[in-house]
Image (cartoon, rainbow, N blue to C red):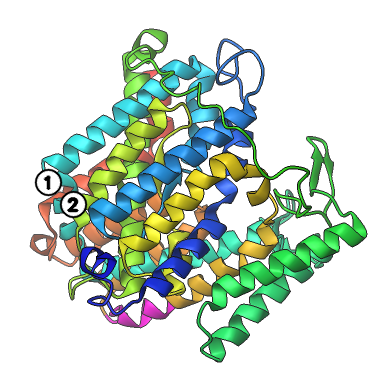
Amino acid sequence: MLDSFFKISERGSTVGREVRGGLVTFFTMAYIVALNPLIIGLSKDSTGKFIGGDAPNLAKIAAVTALIAGILTILMGVVANFPLALATGLGLNTFVAVGIASKMTWQEAMGLVVLEGIIILILVLTGFRVAVFRAIPTQLKIAISVGIGLFIALIGLVDAGFVRRTGSGPVPVTLGDGGTLVGWPIVVFAFGLFLMVGLMVKKVKAAILIGIVAATVLAVAIESAFKIGPNFIAPDKVNPKGWGLNVPALPEKIIATPDFSIIGSFDLFGAFSRVSFVAALLFVFTLLLADFFDTMGTMTAIGAEAGLNDKDGNVPNANKILLVDSVAAIAGGASSISSNTSYIESASGVGEGARTGLASVVTGICFLLTTFLAPLVAIIPYEAATPALVIVGFLMMTQIKGIEWNDLGVAIPAFLTIILMPFTYNITVGIGAGFVSHVVIRAVQGKSKEVHWLLWLISGLFMVYFLTSPINTWVG
């Protein structure tokens, strides 16, 4: 039944590989259950309130984050049959907490998120979103996959502390702490990375999953012996030798009762009476553009890595994938946890062998269990999970050979797409730069007729996106 419904054999996979892939995807993105509450749960809105009341409600936010991620990821697996997991979007949640909620109440900010999701859903149902995807040249789709590969590799290195922000000086990032690798967590990261590489070279199945589990066990043992603690002890105190996000210590209790009471706390149109109509529209437009193209790039990269895309780089069941993703944006806002979107960390599960929606169902079930087992998930530190992102970044980078570097109309946009994703820490910026430069170069070459009219339209919208700050200043 599973094989027939999910087309497992048809896609050259097995139930075992799908289960392993689903588990790996969960382990590499489970951090969102702990991180999302810290981003949106500790921020106040314009009235000085937190989400759900006068005091932080981190446990509630964590429980709802896991619940919605689980439901949506299962929906993606069953409806779209694609190995893609969803959860609260990083970057989007920061923008909502800092850029939007600071100007209005949380309910009004979440209302804008729901509104953005409704607009995205309409664009999917009318076929516009898929039409835009198909209008993108194949070469740029490859560049998007490669750029995302470098991006997630950088995420892995930064989250592990192998690469860190300098905060000052001529370069933005450096090796470790001030140019030196320090602390036991880096040892755990290196152990996990080399173990995965060794197992892959030996063609051992479940190499990534084994690496994550083994590195977590080592991390728990090290923390038990040396009591290292977290890298951020307080807002003004840093422990450079500490663990990132989760401290890998055995919890006092494994099961916790979840509280979902913050679900449904949103005001759909309240923001338009709180801030100017133009300002509210710009907020929605920014969310819309980021959501629109982040997912498009993510599903392209996942499909390419899984070998599911056709010769033109089109993803199977693209309309269903984008439909579920649109519902995710609405669900995130309606549940008070910010917009939910597709996660590029799903590539780690594909790297483990996932090819169908069964992997997403496994990941979703893990998230649902996390609503009760949040203390257990907190055992896994960044340093044990992030080696998987570096490995998958390498696998996605190999697609670069498919780009025609002799054609400057493709090569330069591809180059900008690839480098700007990791350099700006933003998938949308890389895609936008690639689109705009491709349109401009083709026009200069006298080949503007080769550019689909939708790319002209989208490039114009991206220029508005890039110029949001001066436009805000202009409209006051």
Identify the amino acid type marked 2: Asn
Q: Point out which mark residue 281 bears.
A: none
Label 1 sits on a secondary structure element that is loop
Q: Estimate the spatial distance between the alpha carbons at disc 2 and disc 1, rounded to whole Å.
A: 8 Å
Question: Residue 226, position in %: x, y?
Answer: 91, 59
Secondary-structure class at tag 2? helix
Q: Which of 358 and 322 is in front in this view?
A: 358
Quarter of the picture containing the C terminus is top left
* Residue that carries the numbered disc 2 in the rendered image: 319
Q: Outermost residue toward the front?
A: 1
Which label's residue is closer to the chain start, 2 or 1?
Answer: 1
Tell me the kind of residue under disc 1: Gly
Nearer to me, 348 or 441: 348
Left or right, 32 with respect to 114, comes to right
User: Residue at point 64% right, 59% down?
Assistant: 158
Give the extent of the magenta segment: 397-406
Q: In which quarter of the image is the N terminus?
A: bottom left
**Residue 192 in picture, x, y percent from top left:** 67, 73
Q: Is the magenta stretch mostly helix, strand or loop?
A: helix
Is residue 317 shown above or below 238? Answer: below
Q: Mark 1 points at which residue?
A: 127
- The correct choice, above or below, for 43 with respect to 341 in the image is above
Residue sitting farthest toward the top:
273
Q: Which residue is drawn at 12% across and 60% down?
A: 448
In the displayed structure, 48 sits above or below 64; it is above
